[in-house]
Image: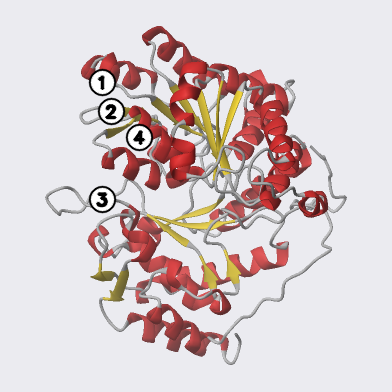
């Protein structure tokens, strides 16, 4: 990775790329932002993109492509079967992971669907470091349950632990003993825990989990969607990986896994996904479901142009300068906020900057969704769309009661090579202002609540007129500024 020091002693990220194509942004006045978030039911997923200045909702499918990726899309072979495009993608995936078999799918949750239908049965359990929304929903829909076994440090807002995404080995052994080997569908490890700050796990921890699984003959499944960030942290923070190449680390993870799946909307920087395995029996079981849910085996629901881009994107993921760009921008944003007293997840992880809404808005009870309220308030203050990662993102219990999340977070994603440092500084500035005026912000209540994945399209109202008062305070402080 490029090591560049500044003579004046300052420290900030230096982009190792140049901008060649741009997209114009639009920052509407705060009064219009207030109307826009109200029309969206205070759900940032339902905002119209024309009303968004900086889209920090996710990194999924919105990372900037390289010139080589864009050029590759012109080579696409759109044959339904036997496509040369698929052959190139398959070759790229097999080289990247060192795997024997590859099955295409249109994105990560499609892979989760196939895995759940194949392995999860009523009464079975899937131990994991931490759940992802769709992974958990699909497991429970097929009659299984999830056991979250992340280390205790992983649920602390502030910590010096460099690998807060590790599984607690003692907890894993206890769960296997509690349920019995036959009831464990598989063990799932998620690179860069999405819901609790994008925190990585170590290669050493993964080796320990693999030994347990292989002794017990339980499949070990790696969700590699956020593997690029995890690789960066393995290389930077783990002594055993310091002198390994990125590809050597990937191949070691793959060697320890029975199944790997990924969303190429994240890993590969295009739009698609896939499942990899070296196990012939597992491959044959999974293969039957691909044509049923995804499409023929040589496209799996993906556009051929996206497949070409993924093939190049996986190659570029082995470039240390490429994978470092996201984490170093996140590191900068987290540290700038932290030194100003704004509560954030530490150490900085991958995917984005995670603001601790539970402490930011400590006057709002979890029953009024503080992370959702902060996402709404931050959009009003800045025009920036973030994502609620708290109780709104959980499912209710079978009796209808709330399942309160371990953390209430506002995630501000930093998709790779998309935002400039001045734009990141704008986001920091508006968060500082909002933090100083945080007592104005109130809670939210559901007016339309779907039963499954409610955070995607549920609608909420503010519990008071706090949004009107927030707009008024902004005008007092900023005058006619956007």
Q: Which mark is residue 183?
A: 1
Q: Say which element carries label 2.
A: strand
The relative height of residue 266 versus residue 257 in the rendered view (above or below) is: below
The residue identified by callout 3 is 404
What residue is shown with label 2?
125
Q: CA–CA distance between discs 3 and 1?
A: 27 Å
Residue at image coords 84%, 58%: 18
Determine contact: label 1, label 2, CB under 8 Å: yes
Q: Where is residue 353 shown, x and y percent of the image?
A: 55, 53
Coordinates of residue 137 in the picture (x, y in percent): 32, 45
Which mark, by number, is residue 128? none
x 47%, y 17%: residue = 281
Sequence-earlier tag: 1 or 2: 2
- Marks 1 and 2 sit apart, C-alpha to C-alpha, by 6 Å
Q: Secondary structure at mark 3?
A: loop
Mark 4 vs mark 3: which is more N-terminal?
Answer: 4
| Left or right: residue 447 compared with residue 32 | left
| Labelled disc at residue 117 | 4
Q: Residue at x 59, y 65 (%)?
A: 428
- Quarter of image, res 131: top left
Q: CA distance from mark 1 to mark 4?
A: 15 Å
- The answer to whether residue 377 shows anywhere in this view is yes
Identity of the residue furthest to the bottom in this view: 480
Instruction: Classify mark 4: residues with Cα within 10 Å, few (<14), some (14-19) or many (20+).
Output: some
Front disc: 1 or 4: 4
Q: Residue 221 location in percent, x, y?
A: 46, 27
């Amino acid at each position: 990775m490029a090591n560049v020091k500044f003579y004046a002693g300052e420290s900030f990220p230096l982009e190792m790329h140049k901008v060649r194509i741009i997209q114009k942004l639009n920052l509407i006045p705060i009064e219009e932002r207030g109307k826009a978030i109200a029309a969206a039911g205070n759900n940032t997923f339902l905002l119209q993109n024309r009303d968004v200045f900086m889209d920090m909702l996710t990194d999924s499918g919105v990372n900037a492509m390289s010139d080589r990726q864009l050029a590759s899309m012109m080579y696409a072979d759109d044959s339904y079967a036997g496509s040369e495009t698929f052959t190139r993608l398959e070759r790229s995936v097999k080289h990247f992971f060192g795997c024997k078999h590859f099955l295409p799918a249109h994105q990560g949750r499609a892979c989760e669907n196939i895995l759940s239908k194949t392995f999860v049965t009523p009464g079975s359990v899937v131990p994991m470091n931490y759940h992802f929304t769709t992974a958990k929903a699909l497991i429970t829909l097929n009659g299984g349950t999830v056991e979250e076994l992340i280390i205790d440090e992983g649920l602390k807002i502030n910590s010096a632990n460099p690998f807060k995404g590790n599984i607690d080995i003692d907890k894993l052994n206890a769960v296997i003993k509690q349920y019995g080997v036959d009831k464990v569908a598989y063990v799932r490890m998620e690179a860069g825990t999405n819901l609790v700050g994008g925190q990585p796990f170590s290669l050493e921890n993964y080796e320990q989990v693999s030994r347990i699984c292989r002794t017990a003959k339980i499949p070990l499944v790696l969700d590699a969607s956020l593997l690029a960030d995890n690789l960066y942290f393995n290389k930077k923070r783990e002594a055993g990986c310091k002198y390994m190449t990125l590809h050597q680390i990937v191949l070691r993870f793959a060697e320890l896994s029975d199944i790997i799946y990924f969303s190429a909307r994240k890993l590969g920087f295009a739009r698609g996904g896939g499942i990899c395995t070296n196990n012939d029996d597992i491959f044959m079981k999974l293969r039957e479901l691909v044509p049923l849910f995804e499409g023929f085996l040589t496209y799996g629901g993906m556009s051929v142009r996206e497949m070409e881009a993924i093939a190049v994107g996986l190659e570029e993921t082995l470039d240390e300068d490429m994978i470092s760009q996201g984490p170093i921008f996140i590191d900068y944003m987290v540290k700038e906020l932290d030194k100003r007293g704004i509560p954030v997840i530490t150490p900085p992880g991958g995917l984005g900057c995670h603001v601790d809404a539970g402490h930011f808005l400590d006057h709002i009870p979890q029953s009024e969704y503080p992370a959702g309220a902060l996402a709404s308030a931050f959009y009003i203050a800045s025009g920036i769309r973030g994502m609620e990662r708290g109780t709104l993102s959980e499912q209710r219990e079978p009796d209808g009661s709330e399942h309160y999340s371990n953390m209430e977070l506002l995630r501000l994603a930093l998709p790779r090579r998309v935002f400039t440092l001045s734009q990141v500084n704008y986001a920091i500035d508006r968060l500082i202002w909002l933090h100083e005026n945080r007592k104005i912000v109130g809670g939210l209540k559901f007016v339309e609540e779907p039963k499954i994945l409610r955070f995607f399209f549920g609608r909420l109202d503010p519990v008071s007129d706090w949004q009107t008062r927030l707009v008024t305070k902004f005008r007092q402080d900023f005058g006619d500024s956007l």
